[in-house]
Image: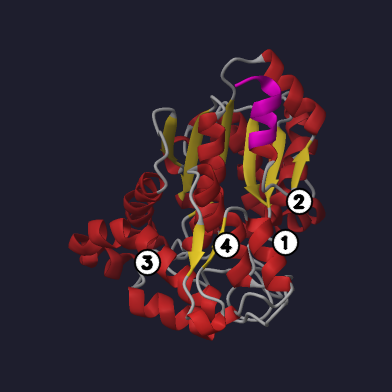
Amino acid sequence: MNPEEKFNLIKRNTAEIVTEAEFKKLLKDKKQPAVYCGWSITGKPHVGYFLPILKLADFLKAGFKVKLLLADLHGALDKTPWELLAKRYDYYLNTIPLMFKCIGSDTKNLKIVKGSDFQLSADYSFDLLKLSTMSTIHDSKKASSDVVKQDENPKLSGLIYPLMQALDEEYLDVDVQYGGLDQRKIMMFAREHLPKMKYPKRIEVMGPLISGLAEGGKMSASIPHSKICLLDTPEQITKKLNLAFCPEGQVEENGVLALMKYVIMVLKEDNGKEFIVERPAKFGGAVKYKTYQELEKDYAAKKLHPQDLKKSLAEELTKLLEPIRKAMKEKEKLVKEAYP
């Protein structure tokens, strides 16, 4: 795979790359660059997490070293109870590798890192204090505003959060950070402030936010009916999709179509398979889609009914999640302890 092919692979299904010129130069100059993606261990991972998982799989295909940061301390800074951190870390550590397995990704160059393993070191702590002297409350609050839950009287922890995320780029020794578009302000904070510490600014790659199944807003771990959890049963998946906001012909802010675009059709297209919607003959019979664009076109033209799409999507998600449910059946105690 040449640099241009690598760039096109990474760019697909992204919202922004800061900057594309820097990224192209990196691909040309460095044989095996490194990227990291950080997840604060707060709510239960859901099917929306397959979007970043699939993107990290693209980075792996493009020859990157991939570091997935399970940020336990960030979880505490974002209101996860301290006494639950260890269990939530274990929950993520058990489920996330299964997601890579479900999509058939080669994880030879994937490393999962626990945040507190390096964020409590003397050097990191010194740098965190040093960076705090170069950061204003205004800039830090602004940087974290789309990520950290902030009350009218916000906790100091929310201001520390973006400083740590900036330093993580340096301490994980990466060239690129990948995250959702909601991370943009923190990423720009890092690009501005790391050079003040005599550390190089990194390239920031941002993915889109998947619309939730409820009307309005993104798919969120804190809104139960907006998402499908990794351990949901086939019955729960079907029920949630049947209730999902999915107006006939409406493409924008449609969580059902978002799952098709960023998860199911990526897997289908990459594996040369078709997405099949089974319908009675009186409603047009079975229809097959090779690309998401074909599916969206039919949906927008009202040639594909929401209920038929939901039924087929439920079947696909049930198959996709089955290995995770099966593997986690023996760990019901961990699930209950992590999310009492």
Q: Which mark is residue 145?
A: 1
**Cα separation between marks 2 and 1:** 8 Å
The crowd level at tag 3 (other Cα within 10 Å; few <14, some 14-19, many 20+) is many
The N terminus - image quarter: top right
Residue behind mark 2: 185
Residue behind mark 3: 318
For residue 154, side relative to residue 287 (left or right): right
Q: Measured along the vertical axis of the image, is residue 91 above or below residue 16?
A: below
Front position among marks 2 and 3: 3
Q: Residue at x 49, y 42 (%)?
A: 69
Q: Say which label, 1 or 4, has the lower sequence index.
A: 1
Foreground pick, 279 / 214: 279
Specify how the rendered protein is coloured.
Answer: secondary structure
Say what amino acid the circle numbered 3 marks.
Thr
Residue interval drawn in magenta: 1-9
Q: Say which label, 3 or 4, has the lower sequence index.
A: 4
Q: Say which label, 2 or 3, has the lower sequence index.
A: 2
Q: Residue at x 56, y 69 (%)?
A: 220
